[in-house]
């Protein structure tokens, strides 16, 4: 921290000011002049919160994607299909058992098993051929998309959260102050989204801990740096590959349940989330979990603020972030050369 | 490279009958099969109906051209760009926006001799800029970035109503009635698309053997060495994108004429992936590959529905068929149908030499 301050005094100042402005925007009631130019504070806060929770969902999808990519140099373009499959499985389980939490576990396990099957039956046989592996994942995604369309049809599905998560909680943030009475009114926010956000943070922290503090994490990180050297030092790299692929795929399945709960499941969502994870990973840096978190947050916020403040150009905003990152830092914000 | 560019006619170099000594050298080297194919293509309208000419051959030529531009980048430049369909869509959109369509509030109604060049120029610019972005990264990353650009274009055209007329796009986009011919009719369009497909095929073949093409292949094989030799690697790559964009742009305008309309779905994610499938299934080693792939794809798309219904499966499972076929090709013959063909020939020759 201190080293960063000493090395980049100007940047530190900019970041400090930005954080201060952001805190003021969130905490303080807006003066009438602000409300006139930017709209009501409630809209801003909602966009901010929605952006952060959407970012959390993107992080869940993209972290598996980036983990698989980082270790195996395999761009798994079937990742969106795994997401959608996880969502559908979660829907069926919730309908069948009535347990929302069980659907997470089962979706994770089922999609992870599919990931293992893919890795063992297909990708193991074409190691080192990056392009071919990627082409295979395209084929897998087309086949999976059509089979899912076959089974579940083109309807929209939504996973219903349990009763204790339905409804809104009142946050201690002032959304507006009544001009007549002077009473502050507080922002209400859907409970389920907050829970999902905290769950994503917990998963992120656990992943960080696994990668940085455990033996398997050391192996994975070594594999990202130099997988030949890792194999030469006696680690059973195929096993590491299978574990990582299963875990990444399982995360996509889990994210499918999350996405099915606070958005909806339909054909086409697979491609949407594949693209979201592509952009997140390009912006954040390939193979970096922290990068995925940062990218997901940026893209989620950009999408939500874009759709609130300039609806026709929301997509372009996301795209411009990607272009800017590519132009100035091709390896991504936190990526390494 | 000589070995790969000659996969189509490997005997070309040895077969030089003395009767043909008076012909120029390059004519001599053309394999008789090529002459037969050319003759066949010229006389297709004589024995097929409008449906075959337009829906099978017309589509195959146009999709083949777009896939050809991808093949040029991937086969000679080592850059798998998914942005080619988008470049084609961009050209089609520009033609509709500057020219005539059913939606004249947006279309500007310029004459064709202004519209077509402007559409081509803008599409080539778009392709070049996308290329300039994509070449900042290498190899496998290119797929991701170009896919992201393609999807951004798709979502943008779908959301934007002031320029791109949003979800519905532009209807009733017609080719100009040049020389008093209605180019939308089956036979004229067949020859029009055949002409441009042949032209772009020959152009790719020529460029691949020019010094630029050879340098590009050098860059594909070893960029660092080429850089050390004094070649500007980035410039070569971007120039390749421009050249490919021109082919894709021409095909895009043809596609718009063939469809009679252009909408975001024309350059959606599905078609973008389809182009990659066509190019890979056909084979990325020779410019004829994309056209073979396109023909297979179009025939499957046109007739698979009836065939599937005939064997008792719902016709909508067409995508499954395409996906499985693509998977099989990628799994068992990474260089596509062309690779199957050359391997089959090699085996045949081996068996013959054993006898």
Image (cartoon, grey):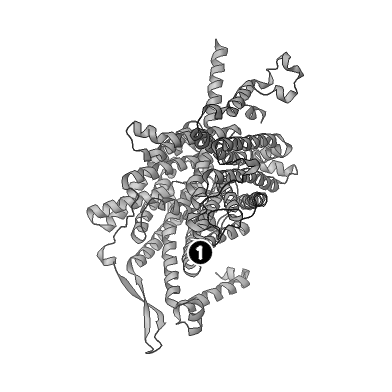
User: Considering the image in quadrants, where does the C terminus of chain B appear?
Assistant: top right
Q: Position of residue A144 (x, y in %)?
A: 39, 43
Q: Residue at x 43, y 48 (%)?
A: A79
Q: Residue at x 45, y 73 (%)?
A: A44
Q: Position of residue B36 (x, y in %)?
A: 60, 23
Q: Is residue B73 visible?
A: yes
Task: Say which quarter of the image contains residue A48.
Answer: bottom left
User: Considering the image in quadrants, where does the N terminus of chain B appear?
Assistant: top right
Q: Position of residue B194 (x, y in %)?
A: 60, 35
- Say which of B244 and A95 sits in front: B244
Q: Residue at x 52, y 77 (%)?
A: A21
Count of marks placed on residues: 1
Q: Residue at x 58, y 49 (%)?
A: B92
- Say which of A321 and A295 sits in front: A321
- Say which of A8 and B138 sits in front: B138
- In the visual, does B82 lie left or right of B122? left
Q: Is residue B7 visible?
A: no
């Amino acid at each position: 921290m201190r080293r960063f301050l000493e090395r980049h005094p100007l940047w530190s100042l900019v970041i400090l000011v930005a954080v201060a402005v952001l805190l003021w925007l969130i905490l303080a009631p807006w003066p009438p002049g602000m409300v006139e130019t930017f709209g009501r504070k409630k809209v801003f806060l909602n966009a901010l919160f929605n952006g952060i929770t959407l970012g959390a969902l993107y992080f869940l999808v993209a972290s598996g994607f980036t983990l698989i990519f980082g270790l195996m140099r395999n761009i798994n373009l079937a990742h969106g299909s795994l997401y959608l499959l996880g969502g559908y499985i979660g829907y069926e389980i919730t309908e069948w058992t009535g347990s929302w939490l069980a659907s997470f576990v089962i979706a994770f396990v089922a999609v992870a098993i599919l990931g293992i099957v893919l890795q063992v039956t297909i990708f193991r046989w074409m190691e080192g051929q990056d392009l071919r592996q990627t082409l295979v994942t395209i084929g897998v995604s087309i086949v999976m998309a059509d089979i899912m369309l076959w089974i579940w049809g083109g309807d929209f599905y939504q996973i219903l959260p349990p009763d204790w998560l339905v409804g809104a909680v009142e946050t201690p943030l002032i959304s507006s102050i009544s001009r007549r009475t002077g009473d502050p009114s507080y922002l209400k926010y859907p409970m389920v989204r907050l829970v999902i956000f905290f769950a994503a943070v917990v998963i992120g922290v656990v992943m960080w801990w696994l990668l940085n503090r455990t033996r398997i994490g050391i192996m994975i990180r070594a594999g990202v740096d130099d997988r030949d050297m890792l194999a030469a030092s006696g680690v059973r790299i195929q096993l590491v590959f299978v574990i990582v692929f299963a875990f990444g795929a399982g995360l996509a399945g889990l994210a499918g349940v999350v996405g099915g709960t606070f958005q909806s499941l339909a054909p086409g969502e697979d491609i949407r989330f594949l693209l979201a994870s592509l952009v997140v990973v390009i912006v954040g840096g390939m193979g970096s979990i922290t990068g995925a978190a940062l990218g997901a947050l940026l893209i989620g916020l950009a999408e939500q603020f874009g759709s609130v403040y300039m609806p026709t150009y929301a997509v372009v905003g996301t795209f411009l972030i990607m272009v800017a990152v590519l132009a100035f830092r091709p390896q991504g914000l936190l990526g390494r050369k | 490279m000589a070995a790969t560019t000659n996969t189509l006619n490997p005997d070309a170099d040895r077969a030089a009958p003395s009767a043909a000594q008076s012909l120029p050298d390059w004519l001599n080297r053309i394999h008789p099969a090529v002459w037969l194919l050319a003759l066949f293509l010229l006389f297709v309208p004589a024995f097929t109906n409008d449906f075959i000419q337009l829906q099978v051959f017309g589509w195959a030529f146009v999709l083949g051209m777009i896939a050809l531009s991808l093949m040029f980048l991937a086969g000679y430049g080592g850059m798998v760009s998914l942005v080619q369909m988008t470049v084609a869509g961009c050209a089609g959109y520009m033609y509709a926006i500057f020219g005539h369509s059913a939606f004249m509030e947006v279309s500007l109604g310029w004459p064709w001799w202004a519209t077509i060049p402007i559409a081509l120029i803008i599409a080539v610019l778009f392709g070049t800029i996308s290329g300039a972005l994509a070449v900042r990264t290498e190899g496998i990353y290119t797929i991701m970035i170009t896919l992201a650009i393609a999807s951004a274009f798709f979502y943008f055209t779908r959301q934007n109503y002031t320029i791109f007329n949003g979800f519905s796009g532009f209807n009733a986009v017609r080719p100009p009635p040049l020389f008093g011919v209605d180019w939308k009719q089956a036979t004229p369009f067949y020859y029009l698309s055949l002409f441009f497909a042949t032209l772009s095929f020959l152009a790719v073949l020529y460029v691949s053997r020019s010094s630029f093409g050879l340098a590009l292949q050098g860059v594909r094989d070893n960029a660092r060495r080429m850089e050390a030799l004094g070649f500007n690697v980035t410039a070569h790559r971007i120039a390749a994108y421009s050249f490919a964009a021109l082919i894709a742009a021409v095909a895009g305008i043809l596609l718009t004429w063939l469809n009679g309309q252009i909408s975001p779905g024309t350059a959606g994610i599905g078609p973008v992936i389809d182009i990659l499938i066509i190019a890979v299934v056909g084979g990325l080693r020779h410019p004829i590959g994309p056209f073979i792939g396109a023909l297979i794809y179009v025939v499957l798309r046109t007739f698979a529905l009836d065939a599937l219904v005939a064997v008792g499966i719902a016709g909508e499972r067409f995508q499954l068929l395409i996906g499985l076929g693509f998977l099989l090709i990628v799994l068992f013959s990474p260089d596509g149908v062309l690779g199957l063909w050359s391997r089959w020939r090699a085996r045949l020759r081996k068996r013959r030499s054993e006898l």
